[in-house]
Amino acid sequence: MGVIVVGLNHKSAPLTIREGLAFGAAAVPIALGRLKEAHPQAEFVLLSTCNRVEIYSASEESAQHMTEAVVDFLSDFHGLERGAFEPYLYRREDEEAVRHLLLVAAGMDSMVVGEAQILGQVKESYKQACAAQSPGKILNRLFHCAFFTAKSVHTTTSISNGRISVAGVAVELAIQLFADLARARVVVIGAGATGELVVQHLLKAGCTNVTVVNRTHERGLDLGKRCQIAVKRWEELHEQVGQANIVISSAATQDYLYDRASFEAVVPRRKKSMLLIIDIGVPRNFEPTINEIDGVYLYSMDELKEVADENLKAREADIASGLEIVYASAADFMEWFHAKDIGPLIGRMKAEFRQVGRNELDRFFVGPRHVASCRDVMESMVNRVVNKLLHCVIKNVNVVASEAGPTEAARLVDTILQQARELACKPERKGDADA
């Protein structure tokens, strides 16, 4: 049994590649179903966010075979040639894969290090996997370990202080690029979790003219009521963009909301004022060539990285502390992972030892002794002796596991099991019976 992760993120792949491999919310259960159908005995969790696509698996198949199967799946599912994206993939197995998930959940592998939003996304991905019945004993344990580790990192360090979400960095970029953010007319496209964070950061930065536009008007109204901002219907999007100074967009869409032609139809409605667009949607909401239009400045996820890197320097000490927590948690998980098969072996060893005791009692109580009244007393005594011997053996197995590792301990238990079976099946010698 091994654990692997195959994926790509903002560090390994450009935005165009990440867009091509992204899974929408509706596609995730379909993808998990196909993976389970192809590999019924394996476990899977699929994580797809604005900055990463990762598939985690636990399987009896070799790491190389399962990794190749996942890459083939990504190619088939998205209709892409392997060569188009394979150079950007990372492949990790066992402890490296475990560490990677723990770092992701703790926000330490994010573009904005320390962001808390990723933990919610990891939890949601695990929830979707559970609904699809694709994880099992290994990934269940691993993901709960990741949740606990993330909580520990965020509660024992200050890594999540400051602007530590993509939404926060987007607003920070707007502050740097727009002279008077407080007076700017800001339109936020999308009222999901990221859109709500954008609104919160804008209000905190002093914006007084914020409007949200969302496909589902009721959801937009809910956000508007909670944050006391204006809400417009989706049909009014063009008009709102045409009047805005700043547009921050995080809508979930597989196609551009605006290509250059459709956007140029909006531009004539504008006066000759600068328009700043910050596109944090993945896939992108605005076609990149819109940036070539006079007076329009378009920034996407990749451009936000420079702002995020500046924030990173301020939290280096907390990052070091967070890494210590992650590495310790990963080591604990791997100790459980390697030792998970010892428990059943010890159970079988106990059964074999007790069978040896029962065999000896049966051999003793034959002939005239078959009806002896002391059998119950003798059986109780033999059980006590067997239990004491088992206690000594198990204690030594635990020492071997601690000093030489779980694999060596499992090998020792297996050897003892074989010897116990031989004793249980060994025929009685004539001298023993006469005695």
Image (spheres, rainbow, N blue to C red):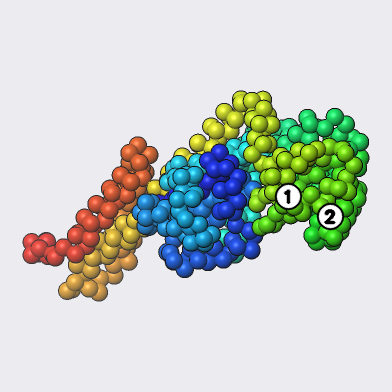
**Rendering coords of residue 428 (x, y %):** 13, 64
Residue that numbered label 2 is attached to: 237
Q: Residue at x 59, y 47 (%)?
A: 16
**Rendering coords of residue 275 (x, y %):** 82, 40
Q: Earlier in the sequence, mark 2 or mark 1?
A: 2
Q: CA distance from mark 2 to mark 1?
A: 16 Å
Element under disc 1: helix
Placement of 173 over or under 85, stated as above or below: above
Between residues 163 and 302, which one lies in front from this camera angle?
A: 302
Placement of 85 over or under 302, stated as above or below: below
- Tell me which corner region of the image, top left, top right, bottom left or bottom right, holds residue 308: top right
Q: Residue at x 64, y 63 (%)?
A: 26
Where's the N terminus, which quadrant? bottom left
Q: Are marks 2 and 1 in contact (CB under 8 Å)?
A: no
- Tell me which corner region of the image, top left, top right, bottom left or bottom right, holds residue 150: top right
| Identity, as a three-letter code, of the amino acid under mark 1 | Arg
Residue that numbered label 1 is attached to: 260
**Rendering coords of residue 355 (x, y %):** 28, 63
Q: Residue 73 has which mark?
A: none
Element under disc 2: helix
Q: Residue at x 19, y 60 (%)?
A: 422
| Identity, as a three-letter code, of the amino acid under mark 2 | Leu
**Foreground tag (2 vs 1):** 1
**Farthest-out residue, left:** 431
In this rendering, does residue 270 appear at all? yes
Dot 1, how many residues are within 10 Å of its Cα: few (below 14), some (14-19), or many (20+)?
Answer: some
- Tell me which corner region of the image, top left, top right, bottom left or bottom right, holds residue 431: bottom left
